Amino acid sequence: MSKTIKKVGVMTSGGDSPGMNAAIRSVVRTCAYHKIECLGIYRGYEGMIEGDFIELDARSVKGIINKGGTILKSARSKDFRTKEGRAKAHEQLQKAGIEALVIVGGDGSFTGAMIFNEEYNFPVMGIPGTIDNDIVGTTHTLGYDTALNTVVEAIDKIRDTASSHNRLFFVEVMGRDVGHIALNAGVGAGAEEILIPEENLGLDRLLESLRRSKQSGKSSSIVVVAEGDKIGKNVFQLKDYVEENMEEYEVRVSVLGHMQRGGSPSCFDRVLASRMGVRAVEGLLKGESNYMVGLKNDIIDVTPFAQAVKGKTQINKELMRVSDIMTV
Ligand code: F6P
């Protein structure tokens, strides 16, 4: 393994996700294993511009593999979008002797990394960290599995009260532009209907499906709605619409919100983070740059940033069909 890099910077950027700490731990320990230094960068690109760095060694990341959030904090930086901001960031990295970067974040963070790489030819590798699972080049982003389990647990609880009162619940889950959480957690929690941005089934179809549910003897129902759904109404408007059109239903709304981003990472996310961290650092040491590490058919592989940020993930059609069959 060629080893010209002596110091790596690691940071978390964009919306946080469970597993980010496990990724930081993995990057730091892989650096220690290869006897190179590692600096943590606080608050993503914001901290990079300000030179807010901390030395990290193998022991300083003890006890964090099981922790949600990120010990390095996270932020979205407006300044890094400017040439001046990136120049300051580059100056700070040089001052601290950082020669390569591992960035844990989403597509916005990778777009920033790509521009930075173009301008300064700075070696950088990415680890996809977002609960939305909306990045091309990996079947799973860090935190997605944990978020699914959190959502399923929450819906199970909502179902208890829904069935006690014979109510219909609209449960809004995260997914600004994509329906991966809604579809997978919806199937996992046995939702009667799942509304996702990728497929606008229309309001008539929703009413028809709810009527069918009632007729088939169901006394309560759960409809999972992705926050970016394109049906034209938000969850509260959907509640009003259904109550106006179907007197037989008493409807309630539950918006799960940011609790979906917190919590101790699942075993899957911890293992994935550990694997991705090793691959990212060893990629840098091999001279790779401008790639995102991802999971493909259970193999850790890399995808150029340009592909990862431009592509659009596809919704699992087979799972949509499974959902339809399950709600017969
Ligand atoms: O992490 C991704 C995401 O959860 C989206 O689904 C959601 O729209 C967004 O973050 C909200 O993030 P914030 O409140 O940090 O802007």
Image (cartoon, rainbow, N blue to C red):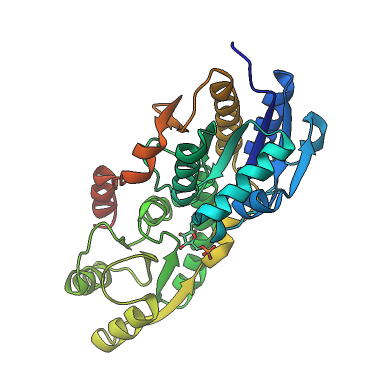
Q: Horizontal placement of 2 versus 97: left or right?
A: left
In depth, the one of 324 and 259 nearer the eye is 259
In depth, the one of 265 and 85 nearer the eye is 85
Q: Horizontal placement of 188 versus 13: left or right?
A: left
Residue 163 place in picture, x, y as percent = 45, 71
Q: Which residue is at a point 59% across and 20% down the rendered structure image?
A: 285
Residue 259 vs 59, above or below: the answer is below
Q: Horizontal placement of 208 versus 168: left or right?
A: left
Work out which quarter of the rendered image holds the N terminus and state it. top right
Q: Which residue is at a point 70% across and 18% down the rendered structure image?
A: 34
* Circle count: 0
Residue situated furthest right in the rendering: 59
Work out which quarter of the rendered image holds the C terminus and state it. bottom left
Q: Horizontal placement of 276 versus 46: left or right?
A: left
Residue 179 vs 268, above or below: the answer is below
Q: Which residue is at a point 24% across and 66% down the rendered structure image?
A: 216
Whether residue 21 is visible to the viewer of this picture, yes or no, is: no
Residue 318 place in picture, x, y as percent = 25, 43
Residue 144 place in picture, x, y as percent = 49, 47
Q: Which residue is at a point 60% across and 51% down the rendered structure image?
A: 45
Residue 268 place in picture, x, y as percent = 55, 36
Whether residue 122 is visible to the viewer of this picture, yes or no, is: yes
